[in-house]
Image (cartoon, rainbow, N blue to C red):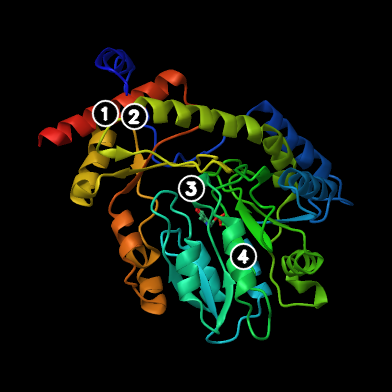
Amino acid sequence: MMDANRRRKALGHPKPEPPWKGEPLLGAVYGEEEIEAAVAAMRDSEDVSRGFGFTSEPIVKFQQEFAAFAGTKHAVAVNSAGPGLDLAMRYLRLQPGDEVIVPAVNYVAASLAVLGAGGQVVWGEVDERTFELDPNDVEEKLTPRTRAIFPVHMNGLSAPMDELIEVGRRHPHDTHGTLPVIGDAARACGGGYKGTRIGQRGLMTVFSLHTMKNMTTLGEGGMITTDDDDVEEFCRLSRMFGGGKYWGTSNVMTKVQAAVGSVQLGKLKGFIDARRRLAQARDELLAGLPEITTPHEPADCEHSYYLYTCLVKPEWAGDKRDRLIQLMDAEYGVGCVVANPPCYQSNAFLAERCGTGPLPRSEALGRRIFCVSVHPAMTDADNEYAVAALIECVERLRRE
Ligand SMILES: Cc1ncc(COP(=O)(O)O)c(C=O)c1O
């Protein structure tokens, strides 16, 4: 653990102004290359015969590059991950009463996508160390109406895809066969799993390129990866009013976004390396602090550390965790975010339509979880300051 001398030195760092947010509003770093790419795409669009052309070269190029990065046959660019998740659920052609298993500790987007496509959400428990959908719990929640397993690659770490795929294979639906596993990788662009990139396993995976995420396409954007030709065609046509074959609306990405996306994708590995270096330094500097559990990275995963997800000890659940977050922010300018309590606790609409558990494991985690600001632009000194601040706050709460 960080010793007292090193901590004193680290806290000599000026209080960050503005404070680091728990989930910084720009999750990546961009510079002249992105600006030049955007301007070039805009200049190219001045030509009335081309305009911003929704199937223009930068979009096709970005999709090809993203597919090559993820190791999939296809990638389909969309305007954000939310509509990408809607497309994924619509692809299933859910009938009333059809169920999709979604982790409860999650952002609200996946469960809303299930409801939007006419399905029923079944909440799954998550693993206490990884916060990923638990395959054993999924197995217990299966019914003859289960149509898909819908994990989120939580906070930058891969879900246990092979185990979930195996559950889907062992319990086929009577009419539709093997249960597909569809990944929400909104927070996990660039993470790894068993020597592959997140997005390679499962029927399809949806990424977010929103401003907060590991890389961004001018603040909004998304990508769907798949090896399946039918899924690719469905998503590609549906994002543009269905192409005469399906229902659809407009979910296209612009050429300017795609041009910037190509540059950001080229930098993604550097962003993830920076996040990993900061996280690993934190792990070492916080080791042995009894009140805090630092993130777990299974041996077969490469965490992208979209968030640095910690737990307070069970006795500090709830109020004391909240006080820790408040102290970190007010006294040291280091933001923390609770990501995430069970969806049905944070969203009344979901609680009303999808039930409120009980899911004892997820609910207990929701009272202990907190994520300490992390960003690829943080220096080692910023990082040591954040760690020192956390230890100071914990010691202060220990005395209260
Ligand atoms: C897990 C998860 N899924 C989906 C989304 C939605 O992404 P987008 O903003 O690109 O629609 C988010 C965004 O925060 C998310 O965190």
Label 3, on which residue?
A: 155
Q: Amino acid at mark 4?
A: Glu
In this orientation, which residue lies closer to the viewer: 269 or 57? Answer: 269
How far apart in space, not on screen, are marks 2 and 3 (Cα)? 19 Å
Neighbour class for label 2 at 10 Å: few (<14), some, many (≥20)?
A: some
The structure residue drawn at horizontal position 78% and vertical position 68%, both measured from the top left corner, is 237
Q: Tell me which label, 1 or 3, sits earlier in the chain.
A: 3
Q: Contact (CB < 8 A) between labels 1 and 2?
A: yes
Q: Secondary structure at mark 4?
A: helix
Q: Contact (CB < 8 A) between labels 4 and 3?
A: no
Farthest residue in the right direction?
Answer: 49
The structure residue drawn at horizontal position 45% and vertical position 39%, both measured from the top left corner, is 24
Q: Tell me which label, 2 or 4, sits earlier in the chain.
A: 4
| Position above or below: 273 against 188 | above
Label 4, on which residue?
A: 166
The image quarter in which residue 98 lies: bottom right
